[in-house]
Image: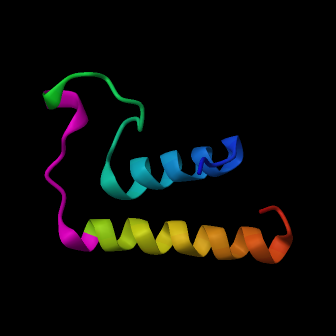
Amino acid sequence: MTCRPAARQQLAEIAKRILCVETLETRHSDWLDFYDTALRSIRAALEAAYLAGVASARSGAA
């Protein structure tokens, strides 16, 4: 299962805004690809992604 480009963009924005992750692209470096992240930040990012999906489904853009 893959996301549409618009959904990928939303996920990238959520990751940047909430998780302070510069990019979701693999950079083949442990230093760049692995993060220590607080549980509250992970929860907030998952909630934001869920709410974005709900909003998308309601607007018919899913």
Q: Tell me the residue at 36%/36% (across/down).
A: 22
| Magenta residue span | 31-40
On screen, residue 27 above or below 24: above
Image coordinates of residue 19 in percent, x first then y, are 32, 54
Q: Tell me the residue at 45%/75% (across/down).
A: 47
Tell me which corner region of the image, top left, top right, bottom left or bottom right, holds residue 59: bottom right
Tell me: 49 left or right of 25. Answer: right
On screen, residue 20 above or below 28: below
On screen, residue 42 above or below 24: below
Tell me which corner region of the image, top left, top right, bottom left or bottom right, holds residue 51: bottom right
Tell me which corner region of the image, top left, top right, bottom left or bottom right, holds residue 32: top left
Image coordinates of residue 11 in percent, x first then y, are 52, 52
Image coordinates of residue 14 in percent, x first then y, are 47, 55
Image coordinates of residue 56 in percent, x first then y, are 74, 68
Is 11 magenta? The answer is no
Q: Tell me the residue at 30%/66% (across/down).
A: 42
Depth check: 2 or 43 in front? 2
Residue reaching furthest top? Answer: 28
Residue reaching furthest front? Answer: 1
Q: Tell me the residue at 41%/47% (across/down).
A: 16
Is 34 magenta? The answer is yes
Residue reaching furthest right? Answer: 60
On screen, residue 26 above or below 59: above
